[in-house]
Amino acid sequence: MKSKPLEKVPPKLKSLYELAKKSRKRSYSPYSGHQVGAAIRTSGGKLYGGCNVENSSYGATICAERVAIQKAISEGPLRIAEVMVVTDSTPPWPPCGMCRQVIAEFGPDALLYTANLKGQMESFQLSEIFSQAFTPAHLRKKK
């Protein structure tokens, strides 16, 4: 994991951060009180943002990362290159296990960034935090 202050990141990465930060403001989080925003960059360069959407039936809650991914999937084929997650927590929060699994489906080599509103940012490869992902390849293996 690499840590870097946000002011020292390239403009392309800053745009991913800004979209995640903007998406975070749309969070529906009356139960946890934690607003989370996410943005993904596809291998084709398109950006999609998402926010967490909670539900009184907690199991129906969906994380910001999965909202962004589902928006991208609805637009066509998807290969995730980068994921940015923005919270107001120190240290910044990483994707949960369920989000890691969904990211692995569409971006097994994705570069992940976590950031907070104070400008702290960390980066890592998905494989660093989710080394044994269950992937479509497992389903294609024959006995």
Image (cartoon, rainbow, N blue to C red):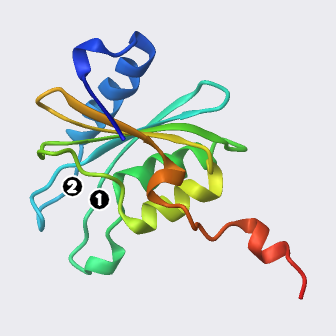
Based on the displayed image, in which of its 4 quarters is residue 43 positioned?
top right
Q: Residue at x 67, y 42 (%)?
A: 79
Residue 87 spot, x, y in % from top left = 20, 44
The residue closer to the viewer here, 65 or 22, is 65
Q: Residue at x 23, y 14 (%)?
A: 7
The residue closer to the viewer here, 1 or 78, is 1
Based on the displayed image, in which of its 4 quarters is residue 49 positioned?
top left
Residue 94 spot, x, y in % from top left = 31, 52
Dot 1: element: loop
Dot 2: element: loop
Residue 58 spot, x, y in % from top left = 26, 78
Q: Residue at x 74, y 67 (%)?
A: 136
| Picture layout, residue 82 above or below residue 55 | above
Seen as rendered, the residue at the extreme bottom is 143
Q: Please, what is the three-letter code of the amino acid marked with disc 1? A: Val
**Quadrant of the image for the N terminus?**
top left
| Picture layout, residue 85 above or below residue 53 | above
Which residue is identified by label 1? 53
Q: Earlier in the sequence, mark 1 or mark 2?
A: 2
Which residue is identified by label 2? 28
**Quadrant of the image for the C terminus?**
bottom right
Q: Please, what is the three-letter code of the amino acid marked with disc 2? A: Tyr
